[in-house]
Image (cartoon, helix red, strand yellow):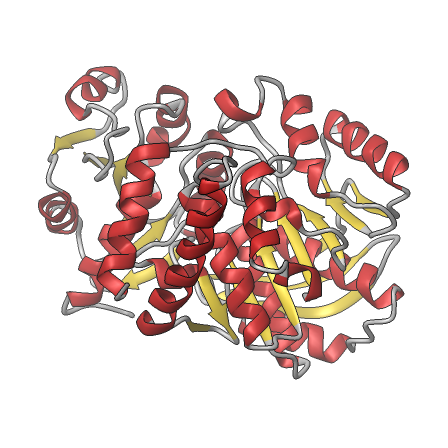
Amino acid sequence: MNYNESLDYLQELYGMLGYDLGLGRVEALMESMANPQDSLKVIHVAGTNGKGSICSMLSSVLIEAGYKVGVYTSPHLEKYNERITINKTQITDEAFAEYLSYTKEHCETIVKSGVGQPTVFEVVTAAAFKYFYDNKVDYVVLEVGMGGRCDATNIVKKPECAVIASISMDHMEYLGDTIGKIAYEKGGIIKENCPTVLLTSNSEVYSVINDICIQKNSKLYYLSEPGINILNQDITGTVFDIDNSLFSYKDIQIGLLGEYQLLNAAEVLMAFKAMNDNGMGISEETIKAGIKKAAWSGRMEIVEYNPLVMLDGAHNIDGISMLYKSLKKYFSDKKITMLIGILGDKEYERMLELIMPIADKAVFTEPHSNRKWNVENVSKLVKKYNTEIHIEKDIEKAYSLAKKITDNDGVVVCAGSLYLIGELYKLARKSEGSAL
């Protein structure tokens, strides 16, 4: 297959299979491919929000330490290649097609044996493992796709560390309808005798993860509060100290925007505490330098100026809540135009209740997905807010409209589905005021 044919193959699988959690197919697939994942040193990251940012910081530190680092994340914003990187360089179109072709051959083999056709995510995950193995990476930073226990990435047997990021209510139809059930699914990445990192103030989440760690003889590095003291914070980044029972650092600099990124940074520091205790040996100076250099697209990212335009993939209640807090922090003196597009299977009524009070104006649009919300129905829900509302289903026109109705000293905040954020990223790149 060439690159376009490999994309057609994935699209065909997606239309045929959709989501189907479970490890049976991917285990058979990796066995057919000689289990390259078993030879990789993996840092496994699960959670509802923050996984991508944590992966970015973890990998940035490891690269700063001189390692060759593979990173596997999902979903992508613009193209599939973003999901598979080595030292921040995306897999080429040619290599993507090569490894998809190789994986497809093995899929056909196991289908003939009666195992069943692997899903899109399983296929891409398997291809990524083989790519990292062939390129002899020192470490793989591996993001869970959904949940953890039944996720395709969970064929990893002995990770260097299991990192459990922020847990909240999302994907309830697959993961359960309580925070405890969801925490149990996320905690499925915890393995025998491998350390686990958890930062949460939720006692139920802690109880579930702690129980799993006891069963697995996994040393739990846990904080309910990280002990952060902010020294300086603006749209260029944050400088902070951190002091708690596990470690203490002075003058940490982080360029990623958002109040929640400080908590993500704290989890990264916890992870390196755990791995250094096991002999990794990365210095404080290297950790700080790596965190400072970390970047992650589509999460409170400034993409244009005049007016300032920010993209944020807040697509669930927890994400929207964190976005609201951050906007209050950074832009309390600015008029805000919200450009919003959310999938219809999300709790969008509650999400709007959280974010609309900060918006002076709002433009509602529809993400490119068959799961999109109906903006006309949504507009009826928001009449109670003292906000100027616009409806524009076409994403490009909605983006232009949002900028047009915003003064140069105002802020356009684009939030919602990553389908939307990916499209807006392409538009921002072409704009005269682009910061990309």
Image height check: is 333 above or below 205?
below
Image height check: is 11 above or below 24?
below
295 or 58: nearer the eye? Answer: 58
Give the residue displayed 70% in from the left and 43% down from the top.
189
Q: Position of residue 216 (x, y in %)?
A: 86, 40
94 or 196: nearer the eye? Answer: 94
The quadrant holding residue 65 is bottom right
The quadrant holding residue 63 is bottom right
**How many numbered marks appear?**
0
For the C terminus, give its image quadrant. bottom left
Describe residue 287's horizontal placement relative to residue 196 as left or right.
Answer: left
Q: Position of residue 51 (x, y in %)?
A: 56, 50
Give the residue displayed 26% in from the left and 36% down from the top.
341
Q: Residue furthest bottom?
A: 66
Describe residue 343's horizontal placement relative to residue 286 as left or right.
Answer: left
Image height check: is 365 above or below 257?
above
Describe residue 181's horizontal placement relative to residue 215 as left or right.
Answer: left
Q: Position of residue 343 (x, y in %)?
A: 31, 30
Give the residue displayed 52% in from the left and 36% down from the top.
115
421 or 80: nearer the eye? Answer: 80
Residue 31 in view in this figure: yes
Q: Position of residue 165 (x, y in %)?
A: 64, 45
Describe residue 210's horizontal placement relative to residue 130 as left or right.
Answer: right
Residue 413 in view in this figure: no
Give the residue displayed 73% in from the left and 61% down from the top.
269
For the N terminus, give its image quadrant. bottom left
Image height check: is 227 above or below 115?
below
376 or 271: nearer the eye? Answer: 271
